[in-house]
Image (tube, grey):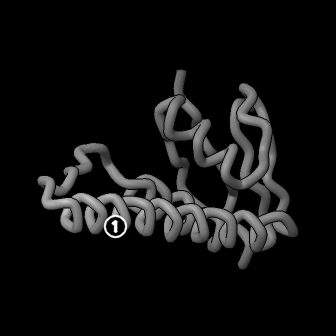
Amino acid sequence: MLYKFKSKAAGDLIMLEPNGRRVLEIIGKDPGPQGIIEPDQMPAAVAALEQAIVQEEADQQAAIDEAKANGQVPPTFHDVSLRQRAVPFLDMLRRCQAAGKEIVWGV
């Protein structure tokens, strides 16, 4: 399944199901097949995504620091980071908030 986020203020944004689901859960939305993010919900969504990015990066750095402190090989993180996945969505949220337009998916 794909999530296709649409708005009149930004181009369409397509995410694979696991990534779209994660972003929607972070911002407190039901990751169902259809939904809407209203402009008044966007500041909280941006803040939640930014906090999740900071937390993921801090957790990864803590794992690296702990491994180094224990004389182990630091872990590597092969997945695309949340920051990389979320930047286009954050841009869309900011554009839509400024324009006062909602974001919808599944319609």
Q: Position of residue 63 (x, y in %)?
A: 33, 58
Residue at point 54%, 48% (across, down): 12
Residue at point 75%, 28% (across, down): 32
Quickly name the residue at label 1: 61
Q: Is residue 76 left or right of residue 42?
A: left
Residue at point 55%, 58% (across, down): 89
The one of 74 and 31 positioned closer to us in this rendering: 74
Q: Quadrant of residue 95?
A: bottom right
Q: Position of residue 53 (x, y in %)?
A: 50, 64
Q: Quadrant of residue 5?
A: top right
Q: Is residue 68 left or right of residue 29?
A: left
The amino acid type of the residue labelled 1 equals Gln
The one of 23 and 96 positioned closer to us in this rendering: 23
Residue at point 50%, 70% (across, down): 54
Q: Is residue 8 left or right of residue 1?
A: right
Q: Is residue 11 left or right of residue 5?
A: left
